Image (tube, grey):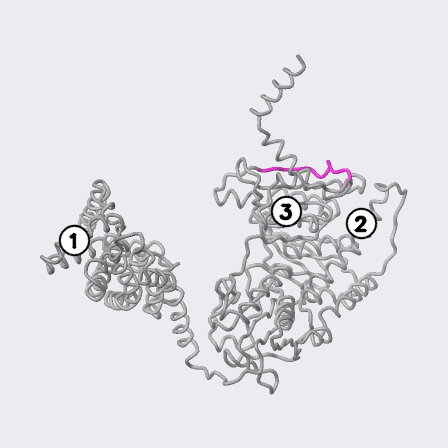
Amino acid sequence: MNRTVKLIVISFIVLIVVLFFAFDLQELFTLSALKAKQGEFATYYAEHALFTLALYFIIYVAVTALSLPGAAVMTLGGGALFGFFTGLLVVSFASSIGATLAFLVSRFLLRDSVQKKFGDRLVAINEGVKKDGAFYLFTLRLVPIFPFFVINLVMGLTPIRTLTFYLVSQAGMLAGTMVYVNAGTQLARIDSLSGILSPGLLLSFALLGVFPLAARKVTDTVKAQRIYKQFKKPKRFDYNLVVIGAGSAGLVSAYIAAAVKAKVALIERDKMGGDCLNTGCVPSKALIRSAKMLSYAKRAEEFGFKKGEFEFDFKEVMERVHRIIKTVEPHDSVERYTGLGVECVSGDAEILSPFEVKVGEKVLTTKSIIIATGARPFVPPIRGIEQITPLTSDTIWHLTELPKRLVVLGGGPIGCELAQSFARFGSDVTQVEMAPKLMVREDPEVADLITEKFQVEGITVLTAHAAIEVRVEGEEKILICTHQGQEKRVVFDEILVAVGRRPNTEDFGMEKLGIEISPMGTIETDPFLATTFPNIFCAGDVAGPYQFTHTASHQAWYASVNALFGVVKRFKADYSVIPWCTYTDPEVARVGLSEAEAKEKGIAVDITVYEIEEVDRAIADSEDHGFVKVITPKGKDKILGATIVGHHAGDLIAEFVLAMRHGIGLNKILGTIHIYPTLAEMVKGTAGTWKNANKPEKALDFLQKFHSWRRS
């Protein structure tokens, strides 16, 4: 019975919509039609006021209930025909009733099936609507981010009560209705070209433009009052900004604040510079460089030498790593930032309220806060791992003896970089990755090239192997893996766990404030990097979605500018062009889409591949291995993505990053002079390969005939 009723309702709605467009009734709901018939409508209304109002009311309700185009023009028409107060009264009730009918139709026809099919994914949304649905709806009504007919239909799928929907819609749409009806009263008075310049009309259109901005401001104020109502706001603040965490994001945030003369405090409980300086980018690249020197010695014959050997003590190599850290350290030091105008505070931070941060016994009051607490290595709960002390990217730098047998758990950037480096120093390295390939974010041929290189250098690569247990049998440590249902034992002396990093979101008071955490474990932020509280921002690894030093710095600009100047202008964080590099040998650098991602998105693309063996400088350097791969739309030179696998790929990708950021296509790269002989020529060579594949055949045929004619 219920299904039959649904079919009848659907058939009726489809019939009405078909007839509406079949008879071009939408032409009646235009400003030109309204103006053309204005006189006739006015006369008829004067003679049949109640009937006209009733008919208008019914038509408005029907148009809104069926989500047909024309509601906006009818609102203007209400002001033009009936005047401001009568028009406002009729339109206000007609629009709310029509919206509620559309809401009920959506609920009757679609809600059960949608909730049944996607119920597990809608749990959070349903709970949010039950808790704050009225406020969300009021915000959407007051600030029309989405068309009202979409709101009507979507809200029908949620658990919000019908009466609540109607009352909130009635109240939320009132302000906007007033602005539109008033504009309609002014449009009705235009009877000549000079009427367009009348003050009343100009003011009405100004209100139409200003209203969304004013409504948003009101909404933001109401939202802020709801969020901050349990907290006491200080009458005076010690700081404009307090930054928690002195890693890449925190340092840049504090630097920007000090540069614009804001009073800023930077809190760090451990070492200035964060992971990048102390346990990440700087030490790993120092270690990779030393390992690279050993690889050159092993390749001595390629460079014309009979033999190449290095004698080394691994302890001294690690001492060099720490010297490099000490050399870079002043760039991120307390002394430097104090000199820049930043007040550096050492200790554990605790956020007491959106306006107060406690460090030790001192409470700092501040207008805004930036959370830049970074991330830490994640150690998965593998059975038996508590029997040993696994190495991580934080602790591996304390080694003074080279592990004879090293297991690297993880095939991402950190795992790949350190696996190759330790293998070059002489460790017997086994790399274990649960996914089918190393570097899961890269295209298959990239992973294949790196895997082959690793195997040539003596690394045992076990992809599609899941680590399930660590055993200690006498003096031996053993990792048990499963592969296609079979167990494999890997004996090791040390194990490096490099399977990802977990955002630092605990132990500084965030939980007590109720700041939301995303499903990825990062702090939930809006496009402006604000958290649940509009004055608390987040940047870096703890914010996601990327965990790179350069994206942390990039986010820090948005977080600090929005924190300091958001009352005037806010900026959405831009993730449109994010490059990254894995510093293996060869390096793997990418920006934008990969070929696999383009296919997943259903984008029709051209793939241009240029072999680095064609580059003269690469040949001269004996680094003529790898390739450049560029993704472009079919027949166009716009760069959607680029990958470079080769020597200095991390440096060379910058030209593609610049091109993508500023809309420079391959044609312009091809027309740019590149110094010869340099590795940068591979970028121009890729553009040339693309051009050759997209040459204008018809034009070339004509030119061939032209040259033939000239020879005759």
Cβ–Cβ below 8 Å for labels 2 and 1?
no
Residue 655 locus on image (x, y percent): 66, 47
Q: Quadrant of the C terminus?
A: top right
User: For residue 347, what is the image quadrant?
Assistant: bottom right
Residue appearing at x 50%, y 84% in the figure: 234
Query: Which-is-in-front pick, marks 2 and 1?
Result: 1
> Furthest residue to the bottom?
361
Magenta range: 607-618
Cβ–Cβ below 8 Å for labels 3 and 1?
no
Residue 302 locus on image (x, y percent): 83, 41
Residue appearing at x 60%, y 67% in the figure: 374
Amino acid type of the residue that numbered disc 2 sits on in the rendered structure: Ser
> Furthest residue to the right?
306
**Above or below 41: residue 321:** below
Residue appearing at x 59%, y 54% in the figure: 578
Q: What is the secondary structure assignment of the residue under circle 2? A: helix
**Above or below 186: residue 304:** above
Residue closer to the observer: 404 or 151: 151
| Residue of label 1 | 41
Asked whether 684 falls inside the magenta stretch, the response is: no
- The CA distance from mark 3 to mark 1 is 62 Å
- The CA distance from mark 2 to mark 3 is 29 Å
* Residue 295, label in figure: 2
Which tag, 3 or 1, sits closer to the chain's start?
1
Which tag, 2 or 1, sits closer to the chain's start?
1
The answer to whether residue 316 is left or right of residue 78 is: right
| Residue of label 3 | 656
User: For residue 208, what is the image quadrant?
Assistant: bottom left
Amino acid type of the residue that numbered disc 3 sits on in the rendered structure: Phe
The answer to whether residue 291 is left or right of residue 532 is: right
* Residue 567, label in figure: none
